[in-house]
Amino acid sequence: MISKATILAVAMAVMSSLSIRTMPEELRSLDHGVPRCRIAPRWLTHQDTPCPTFEVQCPDSQKVGDTIVFKVPLLSGGVSSRKPTYKWKASAGKIIGGQGTATIMVDTRSVKVNEVKARVRVGGFPRPCPLIASCSVHLKRD
């Protein structure tokens, strides 16, 4: 059996490839008046899509014992009325500041591994937006 979501995704892909600027009401799935979709069709501008795009920035390498800063500098796209939330996890070290914000600091004084990876889940946007990203830092030892 084909799911409603699959039918919606296929219909939107077809409409997107045809550059159709409107979407029939029966194909629309609304979240507070904003079309939700599993793909980003061309008929939506980047600013109008419900899913933002972003990346985590971090240094390539850092000395063991230093504090590493990981940040999401700017969300692009997405619905501007949505306020993003941030949930961070670090593979090693300890998050010493910034949990819940776009920037965290990770203490590496007790780290025994050669790499620290920070992963962020950005919330506040409709599902199924893929809102997880990460960045890894190689640790240098004296």
Image: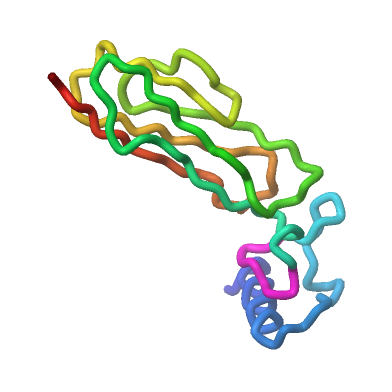
State the image coordinates of residue 66 (x, y, percent, origin top left): 32, 17
- Image quarter where the N terminus lies is bottom right
Residue 118 versus residue 27: which sits nearer the camera? Answer: 118
Instruction: Answer with the quarter of the image where residue 69 lies.
Output: top left
Instruction: Answer with the quarter of the image where residue 43 lies.
Output: bottom right
State the image coordinates of residue 29 (x, y, percent, origin top left): 78, 62
Q: Is residue 21 above or below residue 114?
A: below
State the image coordinates of residue 125 (x, y, percent, origin top left): 69, 45
Q: Residue at x 63, y 78 (%)?
A: 13
| Membership of 111 in magenta stretch | no
Q: Residue at x 45, y 13 (%)?
A: 96
Question: Which stretch is magenta?
Answer: 36-44
Instruction: Answer with the quarter of the image where residue 91 lies.
Output: top left
Q: Is residue 122 above or below residue 107?
A: below
State the image coordinates of residue 2 (x, y, percent, origin top left): 59, 74
| Membership of 42 in magenta stretch | yes
Prevailing secondary structure class for the magenta stretch in the rendered image: loop
Q: Residue at x 30, y 34 (%)?
A: 137
Q: Which residue is the extreme one toward the left?
A: 142
- Image quarter where the C terminus lies is top left
Q: Is residue 66 above or below residue 61?
A: above
Residue 76 versus residue 35: which sits nearer the camera? Answer: 76
